[in-house]
Image: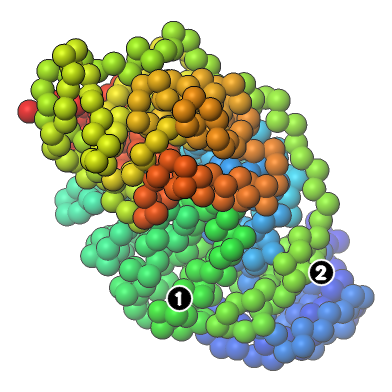
């Protein structure tokens, strides 16, 4: 270490040539907000200096802008449906050098062995993946996940070098009400001196004070400027989200000011390959910022230095001596076209191409996760006594739902009789981890399905099977077809599979490329509309994936029944 430090100093002082220099840059300084012409010198993966340097390897930036590598402050790799090695290949050409990833999807399915897999796989990509230890496995105490992780199980992994902090604390009622089990988890992170991510949609006033008083640092669930303002006032960082399902960035940018911008970060949360391949990653967030009138350096700061400071990543987020040599060359500060990307001093992407060779880590430890027992169409029988029911109402453009009271027709056995003229269908969640045989049914309005059924094993956050269809028989066939392909997504019509995407890694991720996933999702979306009649205003897969997440309002369905998020309690399907 001493020799490396001496070499770094010698390069910085100009006594010896740098390993690499990037000449003719317009360097964006996120500390001062200034842009200056110069050369950047690299030594042993770090920036030795900016100014006038010579190097063993030299690149001519030809007047392009040099900015720090982008940092996504909150993302779930599993929601991209590809492995960590593949997400690196997809994101790095867009200028991303670091992501703060919360693997609570795979940990909910596979427990700590899922975390172990993700950490090992992360070593095989140039992208620097920092993990947050999932805090809510399951997301709430009334779910049926594949694993249960309490404070005792967190003591070892929270201290791992690759674990940055504690992941989003979704069980906000538990925190607000000072539940012992939740406080114990928070204390584990505090003792380790590591940050805690938040998740607190719709909460304000004294309840927000109670949540923030624990030291929980961030929230990525703001959907209004008022929510953003309340969190900033309480010292929290706001992670402005622009994902495949949730598009909050433009709204929140209306609340951005020169005074509060340093507490604002950019994040994806969930971003599918089709979004990455067609729109980009944080480079797309930056384009939106400029389109909304944000100063370019302020926008870049939110994608770099702000995120680094929030999470205590003191070695990155800026182009300055001693910082990691994570540098992105941009053609301009409007379209943010990425020309080249260096991570740790290594050229890793050039004009959209990821340069390193990829070697994938073995996936056998996280396969075979779909376990069904005692399952048949009988699980979908409801035996209702009232024809007025509580229905989950889909609100286009996000994952928040509304609680609706709807009239339905029943047969003599109290079973739902679907009216093809009414956009109301049956939805079910089937436990798939331990073969318990649990299943619960409800009703979904606004999804638009007119034929067949869709089943998915990606159902946040416990990832049981969620299925929606026009009949019990079609739904049963979809679930069994999904089990045969070890999870993923399946579309069925008239007793036949018309499209599918197997996700054998924990029922969450593919072993194929991002382009393959993008093609499959495109085909699934097209057939969902053309063959099954799903509304064009509804994202058919991502929307369905969130219908069982009982920490996002207003009404959701788990394998145990219909859950009212506003009262945080199970309610009957029949409206009272």
Q: Position of residue 92 (x, y in %)?
A: 68, 61
Residue under the image location 50 percent in, 68 percent down = 285
Q: Is residue 363 left or right of residue 335?
A: right
The location of residue 459, given as percent across then percent down, is: 44, 35
Mark 2 — residue? 43
* Residue identified by numbered label 1: 289
Apparent side of residue 7 relative to residue 163 in the rendered image (left or right): right
For the point 84% across and 74% down, which residue is it? Answer: 20
Mark 2 residue crowding within 10 angstroms, few (<14) / some (14–19) / many (20+):
many
Secondary structure under the numbered disc 1 in the rendered image = helix
Give coordinates of residue 327: x percent, y percent: 69, 71
Quarter of the image where one finds residue 95: bottom right
Secondary element at tag 2: strand
The 10 Å Cα crowd at callout 1, few under 14, some 14 to 19, many 20 or more, is many
| Colouring convention used in this rendered image of the protein | rainbow
Whichever of labels 2 and 1 marks the residue nearer the N terminus, that label is: 2
Which quarter of the figure is the N terminus placed in? bottom right
Q: Which mark is residue 560?
A: none
Is any part of residue 192 visible from this angle?
no
Distance from disc 2 to disc 1, alpha carbons, whole Å, reads: 33 Å
Q: Is residue 33 above or below residue 150?
A: below
Looking at the image, do the residues carrying marks 2 and 1 touch, with CB atoms under 8 Å apart? no
């Amino acid at each position: 270490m001493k020799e490396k430090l001496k070499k770094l100093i010698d390069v910085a002082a100009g006594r010896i040539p740098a390993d690499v220099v990037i000449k003719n840059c317009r360097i964006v300084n996120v500390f001062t907000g200034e842009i200056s012409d110069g050369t950047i010198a690299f030594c042993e993966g770090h920036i030795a200096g900016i100014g006038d340097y010579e190097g063993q390897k030299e690149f001519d930036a030809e007047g392009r802008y040099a900015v720090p590598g982008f940092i996504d402050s909150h993302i779930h790799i599993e929601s991209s449906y590809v492995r960590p090695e593949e997400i690196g290949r997809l994101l790095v050409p867009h200028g991303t050098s670091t992501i703060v990833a919360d693997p609570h999807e795979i940990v909910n399915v596979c427990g700590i062995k899922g975390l172990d897999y993700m950490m090992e796989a992360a070593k095989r990509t140039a992208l620097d993946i920092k993990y947050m230890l999932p805090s809510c496995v399951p997301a709430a105490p009334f779910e049926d996940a594949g694993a249960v992780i309490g404070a005792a199980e967190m003591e070892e992994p929270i201290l791992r070098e690759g674990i940055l902090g504690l992941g989003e604390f979704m069980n906000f009622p538990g925190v607000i009400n000072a539940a012992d089990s939740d406080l114990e988890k928070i204390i584990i992170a505090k003792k380790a001196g590591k940050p805690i991510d938040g998740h607190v949609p719709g909460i304000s006033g004294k309840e927000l004070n109670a949540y923030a008083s624990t030291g929980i640092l961030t929230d990525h669930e703001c959907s209004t400027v008022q929510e953003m303002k309340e969190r900033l006032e309480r010292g929290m960082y706001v992670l402005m989200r622009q994902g495949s399902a949730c598009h909050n960035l433009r709204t929140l940018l209306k609340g951005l000011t020169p005074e509060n911008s340093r507490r604002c970060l950019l994040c994806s949360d969930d971003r599918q390959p089709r979004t990455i391949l067609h729109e980009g990653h944080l480079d797309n967030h930056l384009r939106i910022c400029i389109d909304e009138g944000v100063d370019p350096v302020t926008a870049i700061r939110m994608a770099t230095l702000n995120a680094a400071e929030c999470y205590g990543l003191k070695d990155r987020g800026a182009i300055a001596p001693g910082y990691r040599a994570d540098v992105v060359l941009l053609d301009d500060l409007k379209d943010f076209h990425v020309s080249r990307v260096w991570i740790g001093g290594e050229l890793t992407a050039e004009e959209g191409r990821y340069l390193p060779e990829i070697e994938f880590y073995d996936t056998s430890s996280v396969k075979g996760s779909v376990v069904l027992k005692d399952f048949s169409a009988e699980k979908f029988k409801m035996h209702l006594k009232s024809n007025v029911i509580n229905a989950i109402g889909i609100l286009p453009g996000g994952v928040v739902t509304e609680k609706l009271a709807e009239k339905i027709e029943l047969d003599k056995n109290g079973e739902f009789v679907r009216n093809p003229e009414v956009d109301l269908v049956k939805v079910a969640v089937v436990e798939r981890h331990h073969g318990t045989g649990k299943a619960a049914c409800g009703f979904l309005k606004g999804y638009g399905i007119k034929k067949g059924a869709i089943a998915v094993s990606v159902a946040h956050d416990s990832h049981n099977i969620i299925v929606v269809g026009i009949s019990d028989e079609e739904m049963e066939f979809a679930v069994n077809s999904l089990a045969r392909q070890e999870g993923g997504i399946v579309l069925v019509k008239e007793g036949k599979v018309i499209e599918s995407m197997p996700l054998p890694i924990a029922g969450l991720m593919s072993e194929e490329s991002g382009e393959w996933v993008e093609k499959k999702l495109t085909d699934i979306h097209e057939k969902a509309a053309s063959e099954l009649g799903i509304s064009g205003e509804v994202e058919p897969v991502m929307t369905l994936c969130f219908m069982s997440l009982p920490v996002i309002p207003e009404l959701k369905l788990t394998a145990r029944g219909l859950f009212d998020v506003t009262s945080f309690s199970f309610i009957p399907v029949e409206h009272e």
